[in-house]
Image (cartoon, grey):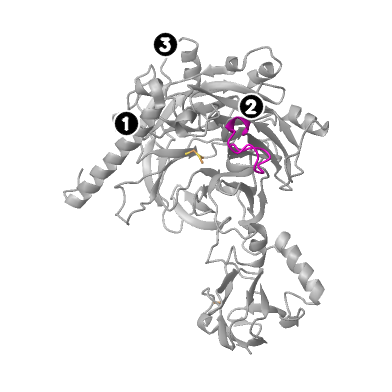
Amino acid sequence: MKSSSKAKQNNSDQALGRRRFLTGVSMAGGGAALGAMTGCDGGDNSAKNGKSGNAPKAHANKAEVAPGKLDDYYGFWSGGQSGEIRIVGIPSMRELKRIPVFNRDAATGWGATDFSKQLLKGTQSGDTHHVHLSYDKGTYDGRYVFVNDKSQARLARVNIKTMETDKIIDIPNAQGTHGIFPQRHKTGLVFCNSEFRTPLPNDGRDLDDPKKYAALHTAIDGETMEVKWQVMVEGNLDLCATDYKGLYSFATCYNSEGAVTLEGMMASDQDYCYVFNLANIEKAVKGGKSITLGDSPVPVIDARGENSEFVTRVPVPKSPHGVNIDPTGKYAICSGKLSPTCTVIAIDKLAEVFSGKIKPRDSVVAEPEVGLGPLHTAFDGKGNAYTSIFLDSVMTKWNIADALKQFKGEDVNPILQKIDVHYQVGHTNASMSETKDADGKWLVALCKFSKDRFLNVGCLHPENDQLFDISGEKMKLVHDGPTFPEPHDAVIVKSDLIHPTSIQPRTDDRFKMYADWAKEDGVNLMKDNKVIAKGPGKVRVYMTSMAPKFGMNEFQVKSGDEVQVIITNQDNVEDLSHGFCVPQHDVNFLVNAQDTQSYTFVAGKPGLYWYYCPWFCHALHLEMRGRMMVS
Ligand code: RUQ
Ligand code: CUA
């Protein structure tokens, strides 16, 4: 402790106390395997192995990005309990944007504008966990970002052109939608795991008969966002992954015990990595071998109980969490959570597993001990894996080829380095790690606790997203990035794959909706300023904006009218946004260059209300306003 301040010392003591507490809790449940492990003793815990005689290679990477200089990578961060997605520049770790998805966002009006309300169907919150981009031929195609909402079992899609949410769909029959992953050979299916088991259909039957509860592995078409099929299985499905060829999807499964209490879920020393055989599932769905559940028309394959042509269960130790595929597409790596190991499954052996030639466990080709509480694994494209270790609060770098040798009985230690993180790391990811083009430059460790790393800001502390330079032989910490609610996951994407537009192209579903209205009302959105009566007590106000003026200086409505204001921003200049705000009516939304946005509200008490532009757009921005007269 450098600090001599007593308060700070106290904070640290508490923090240490909490760290011990967290370790203790998990140890208590962890059983013999964990009890036998020793923690990490801080600092750089490079393991001795045959290779460590060489002097460490110098780091060519530079984490500093000078003012005015651009980052090399886009980081797409889930916003956790905030329900949003964040864009972070890498390596500077500068937060560039927040994209509202499942949340009500006051700055943009998301969640209150007409289109966002249609997507959100009355909800105002979400719990975003996993962000992944659409793929083509094993790398990002720069079109979509997919993100799940664990709380309401939804999948959303963001269009990278506009960086706006364009679809949100409900996943039928599912609760606790957790791991998601898109196919990597093309923008095909996006798989979503439901972590919570329920009676199916969940209509009040079998409430207290947990043996009958089941979970679902759901396939959604990434282009149309239609739910294609679901597979019903036992156990809790956690994280998700796909291979590079379009043959399989993967789900880690804990609570194979089928318990409904914490103790029960940890009783067994063995759980599974489920492997879904996509061709066999689709054949059965086409052949009508599916059922439906409740009101949902989605075909469901019941694959509970035994290994089958649809799903095989590869035994892995105790409550695995993350499953990640290495950039060569050869290995699926399950991080043990309650076991100090990573289990490496050889994907090319799975065909023999499905044909019954070998047992599921025979596809396991390595199981290195990486530390206490492994959660997720990232890759550098040079044969090394980086596993986040929650309980030990370290990142472990290990070599996959060496782990394979060790498993065969050779005397090699695959562990190359352990480095402290601050503190209790959850997800980790490296630059382009989830693609065939993993480039081994940067690694982020999303730490759940920052403890004493930042100024005390009250009861809820920031989390700490740490950036490591992994271009050299050793991981090197280069940045702490405080963040607000738990950003569960992140992917790091080369900037030359991402090409957003600055001017709204007016092409997506939202514009189809406006075009329909304009046609119905005989209005030209880009030009007209008109109040149109839409039957008793209903009006539409079409209005343009161009800095520093609205197209209408005033309009009149009656108290109690349902007013729909449709604003089109005529400005065709990059970043020239306006907005529309009405005092005492809770109306406030953003309209970007060449965009149209609409908002429906009820006109309040008779009186005069100045509507104004809340976004700084011009020297005369403060004058950009008009009168709403309510009679
Ligand atoms: S989970 S900390 Cu929601 Cu991605 Cu592993
Ligand atoms: Cu338009 Cu301020």
Percent x, y for residue 175? 60, 43
Query: Which quadrant does the C terminus fall into?
Result: bottom right
On screen, residue 301 versus residue 389, left or right, reads right
Residues in magenta, as a range: 197-213
Residue type (three-letter) at the residue carrying disc 2 = Val
Classify mark 3: residues with Cα within 10 Å, few (<14), some (14-19) or many (20+): few
Q: CA distance from mark 2 to mark 3?
A: 31 Å
Of 109 and 121, nearer the camera is: 121
Percent x, y for residue 363? 59, 17
Residue 567 covered by magenta stretch: no
Which badge, 2 or 1, is on the more N-terminal residue? Answer: 1
Residue type (three-letter) at the residue carrying disc 1 = Asp
**What secondary structure prevails in the magenta region?**
loop
Residue position marked by numbered label 1 in the rendering? 44
Q: Is residue 599 above or below residue 184?
A: below
Of 194 and 51, nearer the camera is: 194
Residue position marked by numbered label 3 in the rendering? 411
**Residue 32 lies in quadrant:** top left
Which badge, 2 or 3, is on the more N-terminal residue? Answer: 2
Disc 1 on helix, strand or loop? Answer: loop
- Indicate which label's residue lies in the foreground, 2 or 1: 2
Of the four image quadrants, the one with ligand 2 is bottom right
Which badge, 1 or 3, is on the more N-terminal residue? Answer: 1
Residue position marked by numbered label 2 in the rendering? 275
Q: Where residue 7 is drawn, which disc sits there? A: none
